Image: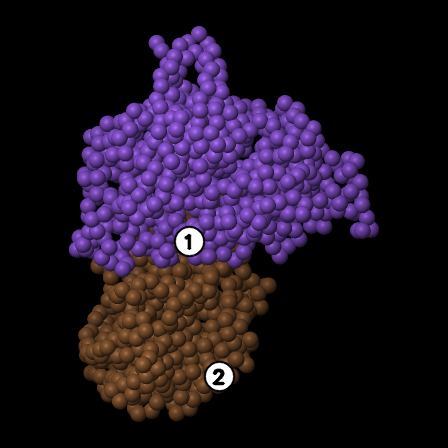
Chain colours: A purple, B brown
Amino acid sequence: MKSLIPAIALLFSVFIGAQELKSPNGELTMQFSLENAGRPTYKLSYKNKSVIKPSHLGLELKNDKSLLNDFTIVKSETATFDDTWQPVWGEEKDIRNHYNELAVTLKQNETDRIILIRFRLFDEGLGFRYEFPTQKNLVYFTIKEEKTQFAMTGDHTAFWIPGDYDTQEYDYTESKLSEISKKFDAAVTDNASQKQFSKNGVQTALMMKTSEGLYINLHEAALINYSCMHLELDEETLIFESHLTPDTIGDKGYMQAPCNSPWRTIMVSDDARDILASNITLNLNDPCKIEDTSWIKPVKYIGVWWEMITGKSSWSYTNELPAVQLGVTDYSKVKPNGTHAANNTKVKRYIDFASEHGFDGVLVEGWNEGWEDWFGQSKDYVFDFVTPYPDFDVEEIHNYAKSKGVKMIMHHETSGSVRNYERHMDKAYQFMKDNGYDAVKSGYVGNILPRGDYHYSQWIVNHYQYAIEKAADYEIMVNAHEAVRPTGICRTYPNLIGNESARGTEFQAFGGSKPNHVTVLPFTRLIGGPMDYTPGIFEMDISKLNPNNNSHVNSTLANQLALYVTMYSPLQMAADLPEHYEQFMDAFKFIKDVAIDWDESIYLEAEPGHYITVARKEKGTNNWFVGNVNGNEARTSNIKLDFLEKGKKYEATIYADAKDAHYKTNPQAYTIKNKKMTSKSKLSQLSVPGGGFAISIKEID
Amino acid sequence: MKSLIPAIALLFSVFIGAQELKSPNGELTMQFSLENAGRPTYKLSYKNKSVIKPSHLGLELKNDKSLLNDFTIVKSETATFDDTWQPVWGEEKDIRNHYNELAVTLKQNETDRIILIRFRLFDEGLGFRYEFPTQKNLVYFTIKEEKTQFAMTGDHTAFWIPGDYDTQEYDYTESKLSEISKKFDAAVTDNASQKQFSKNGVQTALMMKTSEGLYINLHEAALINYSCMHLELDEETLIFESHLTPDTIGDKGYMQAPCNSPWRTIMVSDDARDILASNITLNLNDPCKIEDTSWIKPVKYIGVWWEMITGKSSWSYTNELPAVQLGVTDYSKVKPNGTHAANNTKVKRYIDFASEHGFDGVLVEGWNEGWEDWFGQSKDYVFDFVTPYPDFDVEEIHNYAKSKGVKMIMHHETSGSVRNYERHMDKAYQFMKDNGYDAVKSGYVGNILPRGDYHYSQWIVNHYQYAIEKAADYEIMVNAHEAVRPTGICRTYPNLIGNESARGTEFQAFGGSKPNHVTVLPFTRLIGGPMDYTPGIFEMDISKLNPNNNSHVNSTLANQLALYVTMYSPLQMAADLPEHYEQFMDAFKFIKDVAIDWDESIYLEAEPGHYITVARKEKGTNNWFVGNVNGNEARTSNIKLDFLEKGKKYEATIYADAKDAHYKTNPQAYTIKNKKMTSKSKLSQLSVPGGGFAISIKEID
């Protein structure tokens, strides 16, 4: 009798079991069914064009019957949700969360186990996840691999970075899907910690464009207590399958029902701007869990940082010792190296500059003992996060900053030594509160300790979450670098005001990034949440800071200004040295003026790898800021200013590339023009290769 | 020219390099030399008999030239040390630390690296360790394996347990060295977490006896920031070589100079009593690092424990749920299972009993939420260490115990989830202090999290140390079960008042231990420090507690009493149920009377596997207590009471096996006799198989 079950299931799925879900506007259609042998399968279409071909769903379990097939549908429930919520900070004052939902409850016949697959179809895309309700037969289980498929309809163009368990700090490669494996090796560049798993492995958010002009984006939302998902392509079938980050012993997830996977998201549109404007990732996360959020505030800051990144100065205090031991090494007796940047004099200079120009905060890296041998030694007790070098007086700096109305920003580099960080976390956070620090930049450079684990495994993902939640207890904002890339968790914990998790500006001092890098990031890295990209570099010739560093910043100065608008973040750094800003005070004015929190954002133009133009309305004012970043070829933006309020008059200041500007040969050539504008105005504005423009628009009273 | 170096080194070692060290009494001789190719080599003799044949020293490094050979002697320094110190608690009021030292500084020619091997030769044995001074060419290094040899002179009889990275909870096997591999599989019994590495792998402390009647013991002292050492035997050559516990990725030690290995110890004597009386392990540890030790006090306690161990009652509160989630599961709404032992009523009964009979403390296990699914699930957030079950009122119990003059003893089972414990440690310790707990029994049952790591790796050894030191900050005493076996660290941190780390009394309820087990433990497990063996079982038929448990306690009642004297510990439990003690109040009197801290200890008789008899003088009084435990065959002890003060009169109460007693067939048959005694008295006393006797001797005023 048992052999009949697959046949019955097949019939059931084809004739009875097929479930259809439509997006609110009717343009997206998702169909779910059980295919051969009770295998969960979905497909997705947009305006009657196939986006995802029939794709299987399920999970492979360790030492257990897998949750892949042998299912029957027990129950199907549909619902509609439409709500508008207000983020603590964001691109919009109001965010609409509007979707139709299908929740399919499945029973695995042999095991009598229940799983539920929940689909939410928004106008801009689909989210779905696995849910494991409380039950007798499925309590604890270990995931060997998640087997979620995304079957592509053709050999799309993709903007991808190599799948890696430890880093996302790669330049994007634009290629056909079928070319990924051939281009993989060239796409892998050196990193402090890295581990690839397949030459067809890529990371999410993955941005694609079809030959028919559809834009497709694959990512995940609400990565909590689960391993980070990568995608592996089958070159023959063009099917992507999920590939989770393993732990040290190769397991991919330890689960206890009731529980669920993160959401898998598929955004799709024939207009690339819709991808950038979508709030699917945030909407699939839980509402804010922090009751009083009054202490969470967007931050514009400068920092003692770029001069170390470029090699002009050092994080470390001495060059005299081959190694140091915290609490043992007596720094008062060693010879200072003379290049230590985080000293009282220099920090005060930064505080003065921040105060003079209205910045909220000053980040100081290298202020604490341990930087002499912090990296690459698998050093467990590498930092204590509370002991300053002799030339950095925490109290004096605290008082000085306070007197100048500036907040200090803490830096916690962990060197990947996660246990050590957790051991010191309470004291480190308390130290911050005692000394006037409200925000911390944390870092996870190098291989993870416990050794053999990866930056993106479930265990370490849990650590980042622990750090965020504990910081919230102390009313501390977190900007975590080298942590797992964000998945919209900032909705639930808005004290997570930034992440790195991509190739940031620092790589411009490590040899340079691709000129069109910043036209890709908003389609990929920023889908999950804001990035501490650290823009604002005015001096593109790094050898002027450090004669031994021949890097060139592949960007025009105007492009650097535009980033404050195109790279949405509530945390924005002016990363260059004060003395460089002082050489270009007219351009610097834009950085001083630009808002960091918004009532509204309108994407005016967008094409991944080529250009992005966005207009944003400053929170609580009538001021607008427009940013355009441009890729490898010169291009003229033709935009309408119809987003301005009708009948009002505005004055715009346009910071643009000079005609002869070029990211490589003439990056500092810019123009600044003032123009009167109304909602009827149009603007035609050139951007050179690697260039862009930034516009500040203020209402005239 | 290079090829000449080995030859030169050989000459050097044979003719110049041989260094000799004698013990203070001249009976032990250690010789160190550089053998072929500059290989560090030592040998040891006792009364002109070889104990350790020429054995190599050194370390294999990972991805680096190993520190095995190519050495020349740069410097040799000798010293004599003689000092007497007072432990916070111990077998003796005064401990003499008397040794001759040889410190050999070696340079590795090719690498220009310096290591130092420090030998300390005591009258009862040798300790040596590797030291890595600050230097340019050896800063960070990873140990692939330590290659310390102990070359045996013959096929000795050994008392061994299987080498295992996760547990020491095995019965001892007595066999010839050459038989270890053949008997290995039979020696491995099931454990909650276990991982053997070789059929010739054994653990330390390893006790041996030669055919010539020499007793040899191999162990280590001061295991700090290093991996636990096992021994692996080469069956052909009878050479033991060190085998360190690896971490998840197979590495065995992450070192940063200046640093050193633990001490490797070789005790030797022709009198087995010297092995038991030796303080080498303590003497090789650093002096006490806790300034104010006034809060550290020996503890005699009872506990709500044995009834769970036997299966009579349960740690868990409900049987209704397949799994629980801390902070989610609402215990106030579940159906109690009716077998939960840690309830207010029962705990008060224990407090009453403790108060009535003068016990210092009451341990309660299973008081906190999470026991429904605590084991074997690789559950990360398994306990929070602060949330009681609904039927255990922390404040009420605290007040009740206080009113009765009894201290509560905390229980922290971690289920091996080490990160979770560290995350909660501060709060858990503070909770203890807030609620009147001064001591904690911690547990590490099951596989370690981070998954893939082992109980005895450097990383996890560091955790136990972290827990001890942090507890000291809170003035908390620690009794850590399933942690790495002790190595004398209680000298440095005397708040470590106990460990399990061997097969304790609980195994008597898990099927039973060998009758002579307790005649071996003082020669093995106790070499490193006190054990929370939990003696005092009066009801040997476990089926009387739990009809489904047919275990038999392989011990006579008199043997159980003797354990309070033979198993030295400042922490002693009376493990059986109050109702069992109430059936034998005359015998129970010994447990009430016996001291737990001592001015003096005299080992009267000893033969591993057969018998141990020891007399101890209670701290600050003239009372003596004598204990004898006996092995598999009946035996009569003939002892002189000449340790008693001359001219004084004493009354002795002798708790002994009845003539027809037997551990298996008649374990509860005992006699109690009173006798007057002086320093001239002699005693002839029978002990049956698995039996023993206990004597309480009080000065008559």
Tell me, yes or no, whether the two marked residues, 2 and 1, touch with CB atoms within 8 Å: no
Would residue A176 be found to the left or right of residue B242 on screen? right
Look at mark 2 in the image and give the residue it sits on: B235
Residue A196 circle label: none
| Distance CA(mark 2)–CA(mark 1) | 40 Å
Nearer to the camera, B516 or B166: B166
Q: Residue at x 55, y 75 (%)?
A: B185
Identify the subunit bearing mark 2. B
Same-chain status of marks 2 and 1: no
Please tell me how many numbered marks the rendered image carries.
2
Q: Does the rendering let one see residue A641?
A: yes
The kind of secondary structure element at disc 2 is loop
Nearer to the camera, A309 or A455: A309
Q: Residue at x 32, y 41 (%)?
A: A542
Residue A191 to residue B700: above or below: above
Q: Residue at x 28, y 42 (%)?
A: A545
Pick the quarter of the image with the C terminus of chain A.
Answer: top left
Q: Residues within 10 Å of mark 2 (few under 14, many from 20)?
A: some
Type of residue at label 1?
A: Asn
Residue A277 horizontal/vertical position (percent): 52, 27
Residue B615 horizontal/vertical position (percent): 31, 78
Residue A3 horizontal/vertical position (percent): 80, 51
Look at mark 1 in the image and give the residue it sits on: A447
Image-quadrant location for residue A106: top right
Identify the subunit bearing mark 1. A
Which numbered disc, 2 or 1, marks the residue closer to the eye? 1
Would residue B438 be found to the left or right of residue A463 on screen? left
